[in-house]
Image (cartoon, rainbow, N blue to C red):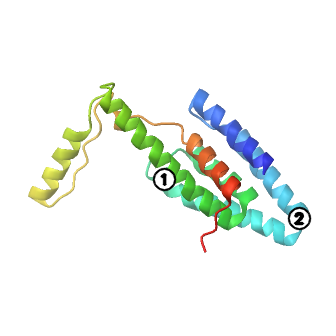
Amino acid sequence: MVICFLLVMTATVCDLKHRKIPNMVVLTGAAVGLLLGALAGPGGILTAVFGLLVGLAVLIPGYLLGFTGAGDAKLMAAVGTFLGPLGAFQAALASILAGSAIAIGYIVFAVLFRQTASPMARYGLMAKTLVTTGRPIYIAPEKGEVMGRKFPFAVAIAIGTTGWMIWQWPLS
């Protein structure tokens, strides 16, 4: 678990500094996780591979919809090699919850302290159009609007994964 913790911390530092998680960090983490799984025997390598697939599967929709970057999905896949499929799923859910809390805090802080344009007028117009025409529309955020900004999701993955490793909460 120490190696997994070092992986998410390294990725977080890179994401905070450069807004990118280098492939070398993710590939090294995944390779080490798979190697440790292989050393545990046939069941261990299967657990690591399925963990990788689950970690990737949970965050790939976010990447495809533009909510997260590819590095975030790859990081969660690498984390899955250490945690196995159930652990990867639970840590990914915890990461999504942490990311949601960070995003809400970010929006509230930015709007309350007038550091950005409020998205409420844009949301109101989209809702009004939906109600009156029955057709949904999307209006892109204004330049400088808080909803147009992205935050380093590796922070949320680090919080969710570390939280899971500390508590290892079961779904059952």
Q: Is residue 17 positioned above or below 36 on the image? A: above
Residue farthest left in this picture: 132
Q: Residue at x 63, y 44 (%)?
A: 158
Left or right of residue 46: residue 133:
left
Q: Position of residue 43 (x, y in %)?
A: 83, 72
Labels 2 & 1 near each other (Cβ < 8 A): no
* Sooner in the amino-acid sequence: mark 2 or mark 1: 2
Q: Residue at x 78, y 45 (%)?
A: 28
What's the mark number on residue 158?
A: none
Q: Residue at x 56, y 60 (%)?
A: 58
Left or right of residue 99: residue 23:
right
Q: Position of residue 143 (x, y in %)?
A: 31, 28
Q: Position of residue 114 (x, y in %)?
A: 30, 25
Q: Position of residue 127 (x, y in %)?
A: 18, 52
Query: How far apart, in angstroms, are the residues tagged by discs 2 and 1?
Result: 32 Å
Instruction: Tell me the residue that label 1 is attached to.
Output: 62
Residue type, label 1: Gly
What's the mark number on residue 40?
A: 2
How packed mark 2 is, by other alpha carbons closer than 10 Å (few <14, some 14-19, many 20 or more), is few
Residue farthest front in this picture: 167
107 or 11: nearer the eye? 107
Q: Is residue 63 positioned above or below 54 on the image? A: above
Residue type, label 2: Ala
Question: Regarding mark 2 in the picture, which secondary structure is present there?
Answer: loop
How packed mark 1 is, by other alpha carbons closer than 10 Å (few <14, some 14-19, many 20 or more), is some
Q: Residue at x 85, y 56 (%)?
A: 35
